Amino acid sequence: MKTALSVVLCLAALLFGTVPGAHAAAPALPGRDLTVELRQFEEGRDAPGSYSAGRDAGREWEPQTVQVRNGEKAMLRMNDAIPMQWTQSVSTQSLTNGAGSSPQASVSNALVWFDAGQSVSVQAKWAGGNKPVVLVIEVQRAAVDSSTGAVLPTQARNTVSTTVTVPLAEWVTIASTGRAAKAGVYSSDAGVLGRRLLQVRVMAP
């Protein structure tokens, strides 16, 4: 029985190039620290002949840079908690005393916390040389829209999560929004001017 089993294993090794149950070890990654850069680029802003009279900075991602060991995961958080006090209700009642009645106001306030800032989670795997980088990235952004009056501001949140293969030392677009820009276009609204491209670049210093 043992001889027959050995013959079967040898035949399997000849046919498939390996012994069943054996697992090839993954090649070791170069021991390097990688730099991951993130930016938002407005496609129409740098187009020849284009002009912009204003930009909405609140809609942009802040440029960020993080260093991570090849094959490891890094997390960068730049978040703030913004307190905002607002009036829930105002009521008036009359108090009677010896001199007559006098109105007295009662105000009820509430405290609300809003999140603002960005967080970036990256894991980069680079096999070395001119080979591309496998990048697992998640970017989250929270912002508070400007508001006046009795209405509380809107809490805006954006998330980009993806796995991409990117060339080393080149900017690559991982997300976009808006319309493609055209040369020779004039606009006072930066949101109409062109697409906003969220780009990433991996460097191996």
Image: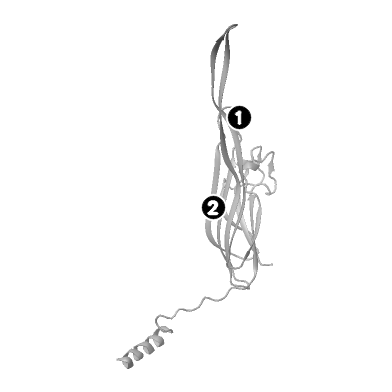
Q: Earlier in the sequence, mark 1 or mark 2?
A: 1
Q: Badge 2 is on which residue?
A: 160
Identify whether 180 is placed above or below 189.
below
Position of 40 with respect to 6 (left or right) is: right
* SS class, disc 1: loop
Image marks 1 and 2: residues in contact by CB distance under 8 Å: no
Q: Quadrant of the N terminus?
A: bottom left
* SS class, disc 2: strand
Q: Nearer the viewer, residue 85 or 5?
A: 85
Rendering coords of residue 25 (x, y %): 50, 78
Q: Name which residue type carries label 1.
A: Thr
Q: Name which residue type carries label 2.
A: Val
How crowded is the residue under tag 1: few (<14 C-alpha within 10 Å), some, or many (20+)? few
Residue located 62% across and 48% down the image: 61
Number of the label disc, if any, that sits on residue 148: 1
Q: Splitting the image into 4 quarters, where does residue 133 fall? A: bottom right
Residue located 52% across and 55% down the image: 161
Position of 8 with respect to 56 (left or right) is: left
Rendering coords of residue 54 (x, y %): 68, 39
Q: Splitting the image into 4 quarters, where does residue 143 fall? A: top right
Rendering coords of residue 142 (x, y %): 57, 45
In the image, farthest residue toward the bottom: 3
Rendering coords of residue 52 (x, y %): 68, 41
Q: How is the image coloured?
A: one colour
Identify whether 19 is placed above or below 116.
below
